Amino acid sequence: MLKDESTTKSFDLLGLRPTPLIVLYVVLVFIYLFGFGIKIGGVPIGMILGVACGLLLLVKGHLPRFSRFWQVELIILGVMIVFLVIIEITTGPGINVSSFSVYMFRMVLEGLLPAYVLGRISASLHLDYRFFCRMLLYLCLFQLFAAAIMVAFPAVKNFYLDKMLVVDTEAVIRSDLFSLLRGFGIGYAYLCWFPFALALMVIQLLFTRTIHSRPIQGLFIIGMFALIGLNARIGFIPILFGLLWYAFRTGRRELARDAFYSVGVILLLILCLSALNLGGEFEARVKFLKGWVIDEGFLNLFGDKEGNTMSFLNNFNIFSQFSIKDFLIGRGELLIPENQQLYNDVGYIQILYTGGLLLSGLLYGLFGVFLARLRQLIRKTTAMGLVPWKMRYFPIVCIISMYVAHYKLRFFELNEAVQFLFLQIAFLSALIQQSTTKDGDCV
């Protein structure tokens, strides 16, 4: 049975001695979640990791196990990829690196394959869920440290974007505004899914009470709130739904109250600092947080003023050019911001434009399968005493947050948050396997 975390006094590194295999596992998890966009010789490290995992399973003869593990998901993905290839060739502009069929294939290569192998490795190392949560805590703290370094030393951030991510100089993230005010930490999808994934991790750490000290927990929440706010407001969605659901379902409001107090403290701090004339980049970032998070974010939801974000979300001119065929199978191409007349931020509209109702049904059904599987695994592991029982609320938070976030931008493809979902499924499956078998084979 899982011991009560509140009785644990020590806070040793990940709860285990940091053996070379443990360290290697944590590094691989970090690369999988956050470093997949880093390029080596022009090739993303996520692709290298995926190919390496595929070759490992092929050599060991375990590809059939991988196929059985993700059987339903792979079938749906296969149907989607075939459908997309057909409409991209016949209706769309053809297939290129930005085609949605390629994104779906990458979900298998860089998402499902490494997640499965990492799950098998965790089973061979006999890692428990306490380890998993503490590992997430250390990864979040590392992201805070990396962000602080980038804020203090802009050259470090420029080096990361130039040499490691190889971001084009004309990309949005490289503009003067975003370079100064957004894109902090080691990630890839800075302006949306990187902070969203961090928010999911924060909620999990709160649900599992990984941090026992209230003052330290408050500081942690404040730091993560600032990091999420600097990168993208969409990361507040899981935090909001998670805290509200926790307070409503448990009837115990201490956790939600502490978190809301911490959020209130940083909002008050932002307001106070924005009233001071401190000068330099620090003042610019404080004013950005105030305008981006408070003025244009929260207050604009209840006002008449329409910002750029709301303007994109409310642009439904796309429907005026849709035929019945377009609604059914789409146009075989992705909407891009350069097409100002048609572009729309809404993920549901983008998928409808690409593959119509058919692709929409397959894609949302696929992620319904993923989320239902996560819910089933958490219910089973909590019943076995392997996972804290409050984690039963986590899948509901994921379901609500992900489908709401898809309204803002295309969510259901390869990104940090989706890979975190895959890793959860693989790790929980490994926990169950550990408790029912003594198979020590890592894959």
Image (cartoon, rainbow, N blue to C red):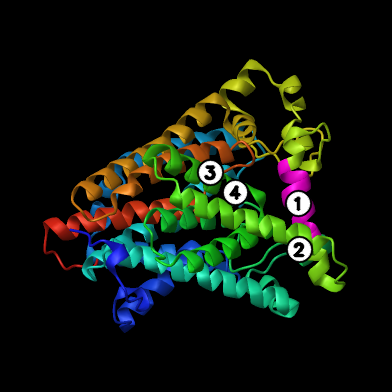
Name the secondary structure under disc 1.
Answer: helix
Asked whether residue 257 is drawn in magenta, I would say no
Location of mark 4 (residue):
236
Highlighted magenta segment, given as a residue range: 286-298
Q: Earlier in the sequence, mark 3 or mark 1?
A: 3
Q: Which mark is residue 101?
A: 3
Q: Given the current orientation, which residue lies at the most extreme top position?
A: 324
Q: Which residue is mark 2?
A: 181
**Badge 4 amino acid:** Phe
Q: State how far apart marks 3 and 4 are (Cα).
A: 30 Å
Please tell me which residue lies in front, 198 or 245: 245
Number of residues whose C-alpha sits closer than 10 Å to that of mark 3, classed few (under 14), some (14–19) or many (20 or more)? many
Which tag, 3 or 4, sits closer to the chain's start?
3
Pointers 3 and 4 in contact (CB under 8 A)? no
What residue is pinned by disc 1? Answer: 292
Identified at 57% across, 44% down, the residue is 237
Q: Do the residues under discs 1 and 2 have CB atoms within 8 angstroms?
A: yes
What secondary structure is marked by label 2?
Answer: helix
Q: CA distance from mark 1 to mark 2?
A: 10 Å
* Rendered image quadrant of residue 308: top right
Three-letter code, disc 3: Ser
Residue 333 location (% of width, % of height): 65, 38
Residue at the spot 63% in from the left edge and 71% down from the top edge: 147
Q: How far apart are labels 4 and 2 at the CA level?
A: 18 Å
The label nearer to you, 2 versus 3, is 2
Disc 1 and disc 4: Cα gap in Å? 13 Å
Sequence-first disc among 1 and 4:
4
Label 3, label 1: how far apart the Cα atoms are: 34 Å
